[in-house]
Amino acid sequence: MEFIYLFIGVVIGVIGGFFVSKKLSASEQDYNKLEQQVNESKSSLEQYKQDVAAHLDSSADLLAQMNETCKTAMTQMEKSTLLLNKANSETNAMPFFSKETEAQLRSNPQKVKSSRSRKKVPITEAPLDYSNDPSGLFNDNKQIVTNSPG
């Protein structure tokens, strides 16, 4: 009889062990899945950090390049301003006309003024390329259409 009790105890122990191991293995599988997700999240976070760092580096390089371009443009503007100021000062020192021409213009002011002033005559006639006989094309009167079928 003891053998039967022992056999029943072993069968109950095997069945109980089967269910306990099943339960433990399911939680272990969940643990492994969660650990895998954590590792994937960590690797994606590291990749994101590297991408952000690369983006910030390229942005810093572009800003440095833009700063150099602005410095070059400012230097060019300063040079152009100096050249323009130098040209203006030299232009004021050099007359537009020669001394002989200026003397001649000052000695004969009547000729200069008479050529500029013209008599204004009121125009009463139309120019020669206009017709004296108006066609009436732009009047509000209805025109007869000659190529209509009716």
Image: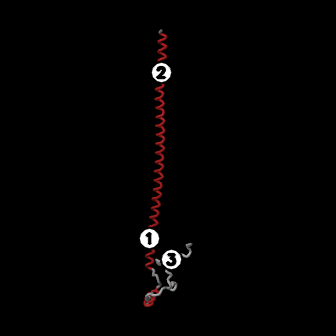
Residue 77 position within the rendered picture, expressed as x and y whole percent measured from the top left:
45, 67
Q: How far, Cα to Cα, is label 1 from label 2?
A: 97 Å
Q: Nearer the viewer, mark 1 or mark 3?
A: 3
Residue 27 position within the rendered picture, expressed as x and y whole percent measured from the top left:
46, 29
In this view of the protein, which residue sits in the foreground, 95 or 23?
A: 23
Q: Along the polypeptide, which appears first: circle 1 or circle 2?
A: 2
Whether residue 17 is visible here, answered yes or no, is: yes
Disc 1 + disc 2, Cβ < 8 Å: no
Mark 1 lies on residue: 82
In this view of the protein, which residue sits in the foreground, 16 or 128?
A: 128
- In the displayed structure, 80 sits above or below 22; it is below
Q: Quadrant of residue 85?
A: bottom left
The amino acid pointed to by label 1 is Leu
Dot 1, crowdedness within 10 Å: few (<14), some or many (≥20)? Answer: few
- In the picture, the disc for residue 17 is 2
Dot 2, crowdedness within 10 Å: few (<14), some or many (≥20)? Answer: few
